[in-house]
Image (cartoon, rainbow, N blue to C red):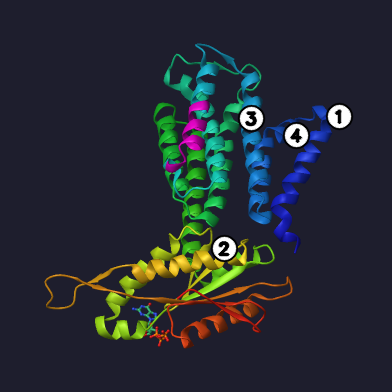
Amino acid sequence: MLGKHLPVVLPFIFLITAVTAQWLPIASAPWLQVALEYLPVALLTLGWGLSRVYQQSKLSFLLLVFAGFVSLWQWLPELTLRAGAREIILVAVSVLVLIFLWIPERMAGLSRNWQCYSILFLVVLATHLLLTLPQFGHPLTIVLPHLQPVSLAMAPMAIITAVLLMAIVSFWKQLKLTQAVGVMLALHLMLCLVFEPSLYHFQVMALLVATLVIAGLMSHSHYLAFYDALTELKNRRSLYLAINNCPEGYHLAIIDIDYFKRFNDRYGHDVGDEVLRTIAMLIRNHGLGAQAFRLGGEEFVLLFPSIKPEACGKALSQLRRRIADYPFMIRSQGDNEPHREGLTISLGLAQQFTAQESIDEVLKRADNALYRAKSQGRNRLVMDADKGKFWVVLGQ
Ligand SMILES: Nc1nc2c(ncn2[C@@H]2O[C@H](COP(=O)(O)OP(=O)(O)OP(=O)(O)O)[C@@H](O)[C@H]2O)c(=O)[nH]1
C-alpha cells in the first residue's frame, strides 16, 4: 500500500530534510549543497506524485511553477553575465510561458502539468545552452566564478534527470515529446562532441542514448500492455487501473453496438473493423469529460470520475444520438458510389454507490443495465438507479 504513496512521501522527506538542514550544524556540508541543487527535481517529483496519486492537479500545477522559479533562483545569482544574457534568459522564459500557457491549442492533447514540465525542462535547457555557448566562441559568455567546473558538469546531468522524469511521465501519458526533446539533446551533445571532443561528453552522450532507448522501450511495452491495437483506445487492463485511481462514486457506462454481427456478415470483417475505429473515434471525442476504453469485441466503456447522474445520463444520450445520426459511408463491391449506412448503440450505466463495491460488481450492474437496453429494443440508455432494484430508461 505504501508503494502507491512513495512518489509523494520520498520527495517530501527530501525537501523537509534539505530545507531544515540549513539551520543545523551540517549546513555547510558539501553533500548538502549538492542535495540543494536537486530541490527543483524534488519539487517536480512531488508535483507529479500529487497529480498522479491524489489527482491534485491544481496543487501540483502551483508546485511545478514554483519548481521553475526555484531553479531560476538557483542559477541566476550565481551568474556573472555579459551582454545582458540574464535578460535574454528571462525574456526567453516569458515567451515560453506565453506559448505554453496562453496558446493552449498549440499543445492540444497535453495536460497543463505536462506544459509545466516542459517549461521547467526548457529553462534548464536554455541555461545549459548559454553555459556552453563559450565553447563555440560565442560573445554571450557566462562566467561561473565558484561553480566551475562542477556546475558545468551538473547541467547536462540535470538535463538527463529531466529526460528521465519526462520518460516516467510519458510512460503514463504516451507522449512523443520525450523522443523529440531527446533528439534535440542528442544533436546538441553531438555539436559539443564535434567542437570539443572529450571523454566526458562521450559519457554524457552514452547515458543519454541509453536513457532514450530505455524510455522508448518502456513507452512501447506500455502501449502494448495498455492499449487496444485496432482502435488505439485504452484496453480492459487500463480500465481496471483507472478505476483503482478513481475517487469513490464514479459512473461507468458500457456501450455496445447494435446488431454488429449482421453488419459484419453483410459487409465483411474489414469494413466492420473500420466502423469499430470510427465509433471508437466518436466515443473518444465525445467531449464528456470521461475516459474511453475498449472492453473487447464491439463493447466500449466510458468512465466518469466525478459527475452527477443526471449530467451523466444527458451526456450519454447526446453520444447515442450522435452515433445514430452519423453517416457511415460504405462502398459495396460493384458500387460506383458509397452509400450511407446507419448504426446505433445501446448503453448500460451504473454508479459505484459505496467504496466497498468492487469494480466487477459495478461492471456487472452496468452490464445488466445494458442487457435491459438491448431487450427493450436497443438504441437506448438504461441506468441502474438503485443496485438492480430500479432501472431508468434515458432516451430513445
Ligand atoms: N470486424 C470486427 N468484428 C468484431 C470484432 N470483435 C468482435 N466482432 C464481432 O462483433 C459481433 C458481435 O455480435 P453479437 O455479440 O452477436 O452481437 P450483435 O450482433 O452486435 O447484436 P446485439 O449486441 O445483440 O445487438 C460478432 O460478429 C463478432 O465477430 C472486431 O475486432 N472486428
Choose the circle earlier in sequence order: 4 or 2: 4
Choose the circle earlier in sequence order: 3 or 1: 1
Residue tagged by mark 4?
Answer: 31
Identify which amino acid the numbered label 1 is placed on.
Trp
Q: Residue 105, position in %: x, y? A: 43, 43
Do labels 4 and 2 touch, CB within 8 Å? no
Q: Of tags 4 and 2, which is closer to the observer?
A: 2
* Magenta segment: 94-105
Identify which amino acid the numbered label 4 is placed on.
Trp
Identify which amino acid the numbered label 2 is placed on.
Ala
Residue tagged by mark 1?
Answer: 23
Please say whether residue 288 is one of the residues in the magenta stretch: no
Outermost residue to the top:
83
Q: Of tags 3 and 1, which is closer to the observer?
A: 3
Identified at 31% across, 82% down, the residue is 264
Task: Give the crowd class for mark 2: few <14, some 14-19, many >=20 residues within 10 Å.
Answer: few
Secondary structure of the residue carrying numbered label 1: helix
Q: Of tags 1 and 4, which is closer to the observer?
A: 1
Residue 325, located in which quarter of the rendered image?
A: bottom left
Identify which amino acid the numbered label 3 is placed on.
Phe
Choose the circle earlier in sequence order: 2 or 3: 3
Choose the circle earlier in sequence order: 1 or 2: 1
Q: Residue 390, position in %: x, y? A: 63, 82
Observer-nearest of 345 and 138: 345
Query: Viewed as shown, does residue 313 lie left or right of 105?
Result: right
